[in-house]
């Protein structure tokens, strides 16, 4: 580049797909899924792209970016991503340290990292000092709204697609029937055999006492980790569960910033940290969270968004896997052109400058809300 690249504007697109089947976990029904796609344009024709979740409040995220974030980054260089992060964090500290507004800036930060890689001609994992260009990835689904036969069928389907690690939901009937959960997990383990890694996600449904009892009953089925057994904000409860079982406890997808991760770690509430760059502050803040995990010798397994996480995970020595949420596959097929796909449970990261993803802008604009 002949001069410092400057940001000229931000476009925001909401891409949403209604669910064609009945999907529910222990605490909520999933009626639609989607991505909010961020396009950060520059004066030298480069574009950086980031993504966050289309959940409740997507339109508010769009408005926040257009009216709050965009004015603060226009005319600035993406190379100053750390400076821009700090400015935005303090600018809206009274209303945006968590939640929708933080998701909004997380997507923008991802787009800035995409731009930094493109400006410097490096894939982001190389920019971060990473030495591996592939990451294990597991299939995630197994809804509590499925009956036992449907649950087993999906688990078999995941394995037939080459995954050697899968994650299923527990907490049927709103968490009120742990015995049925045990029966279902036993049926899955018998169906997939002993070699496939199996993880469980309770989606915040139980008290610590119920979670401990369930964990100690289900561990005979060789569970790799037990995710969010109690509400994510019940950090003392998470700590009690962790102390009450030898199953590794996974959590962190609902934490924002290094301070949330610090609190989980200091409470002794986590074995596997699942921070999400599309929520926690983008790569800029996630790197700080990863450093904390390394200092406490904890594993990292980012939540969802495998295409957003593949670069940072590849550059993280203690990152063990990516997560592919199967319900997002139709949205991925709309948003991206030929994105990397897992092959035998491994995602190979493109050696292309930036995040290495090509967005189907014509399709995105066609379906965007």
Image (cartoon, rainbow, N blue to C red):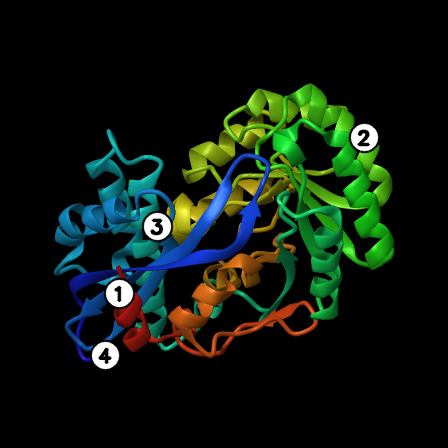
Instruction: Pick whichever of labels 1 and 3 is earlier in the sequence.
Output: 1
* Residue 317 picture quarter: bottom right
Residue under pointer 3 = 106
Give the residue at x 62% y 47%: 143
Q: CA distance from mark 3 to mark 2?
A: 37 Å
* Residue 203 picture quarter: top right
Q: Is residue 64 left or right of residue 367?
A: left
Give the residue at x 50% y 36%: 261
- Say which element carries label 2: helix
Q: Position of residue 202 (x, y in %)?
A: 63, 37
> Would you place residue 32 above or below residue 175 in this image?
below
Instruction: Pick whichever of labels 4 and 3 is earlier in the sequence.
Output: 4
Q: Position of residue 284 (x, y in %)?
A: 38, 51
Instruction: Pick whichever of labels 4 and 2 is earlier in the sequence.
Output: 4
Q: CA distance from mark 1 to mark 2?
A: 47 Å
Q: Which mark is residue 216?
A: 2
Q: Position of residue 48 (x, y in %)?
A: 30, 68
Along the line of sight, the residue nearer the viewer: 259 or 142: 142
Q: Marks 1 and 4: which is nearer the front?
A: 1
Q: CA distance from mark 1 to mark 3?
A: 13 Å
* Residue 132 picture quarter: bottom right
Residue under pointer 1 = 39
- Say which element carries label 4: loop
- Say which element carries label 1: strand
Q: Is residue 227 left or right of residue 289?
A: right
Give the residue at x 70% y 55%: 166
Instruction: Pick whichever of labels 1 and 2 is earlier in the sequence.
Output: 1
Instruction: Pick whichever of labels 3 and 2 is earlier in the sequence.
Output: 3
Q: Marks 3 and 2: which is nearer the front?
A: 2
Give the residue at x 24% y 64%: 40
């Amino acid at each position: 580049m002949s001069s410092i690249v400057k940001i000229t504007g931000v476009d925001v697109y909401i891409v949403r797909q209604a669910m064609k089947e009945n999907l529910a976990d222990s605490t909520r029904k999933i009626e639609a899924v989607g991505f909010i796609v961020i396009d950060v344009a520059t004066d030298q024709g480069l574009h950086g792209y980031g993504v966050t979740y289309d959940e409740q409040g997507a339109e508010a995220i769009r408005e926040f970016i257009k009216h709050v974030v965009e004015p603060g980054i226009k005319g600035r260089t993406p190379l100053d991503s750390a400076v821009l992060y700090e400015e935005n964090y303090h600018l809206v500290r009274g209303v945006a340290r968590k939640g929708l507004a933080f998701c909004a800036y997380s997507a923008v930060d991802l787009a800035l990292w995409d731009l930094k890689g493109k400006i410097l001609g490096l894939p982001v994992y190389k920019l971060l000092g990473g030495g591996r260009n592939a990451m294990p990835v597991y299939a995630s689904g197994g809804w509590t709204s499925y009956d036992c036969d449907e649950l087993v069928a999906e688990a078999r389907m995941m394995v037939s697609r080459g995954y050697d690690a899968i994650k299923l939901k527990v907490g049927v009937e709103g968490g009120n029937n742990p015995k049925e959960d045990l029966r279902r997990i036993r049926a899955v383990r018998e169906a997939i055999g002993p070699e496939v890694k199996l993880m469980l996600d309770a989606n915040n449904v139980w008290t610590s006492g119920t979670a401990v009892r369930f964990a100690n009953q289900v561990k005979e089925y060789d569970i790799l980790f037990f995710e969010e057994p109690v509400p994510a904000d019940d950090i003392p409860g998470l700590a009690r569960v962790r102390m009450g079982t030898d199953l590794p406890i996974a959590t962190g997808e609902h934490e924002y910033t290094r301070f949330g991760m610090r609190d989980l770690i200091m409470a002794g509430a986590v074995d596997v940290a699942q921070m999400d760059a599309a929520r926690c502050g983008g790569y800029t803040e996630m790197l700080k969270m990863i450093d904390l995990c390394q200092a406490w010798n904890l594993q990292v397994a980012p939540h969802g968004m495998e295409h957003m996480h593949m670069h940072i995970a590849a550059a993280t020595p203690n990152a063990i896997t990516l997560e592919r949420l199967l319900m997002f596959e139709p949205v991925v097929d709309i948003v991206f052109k030929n994105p990397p796909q897992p092959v035998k449970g491994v995602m190979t990261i493109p050696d292309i400058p930036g995040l290495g993803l090509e967005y189907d802008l014509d399709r995105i604009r066609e379906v965007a809300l």
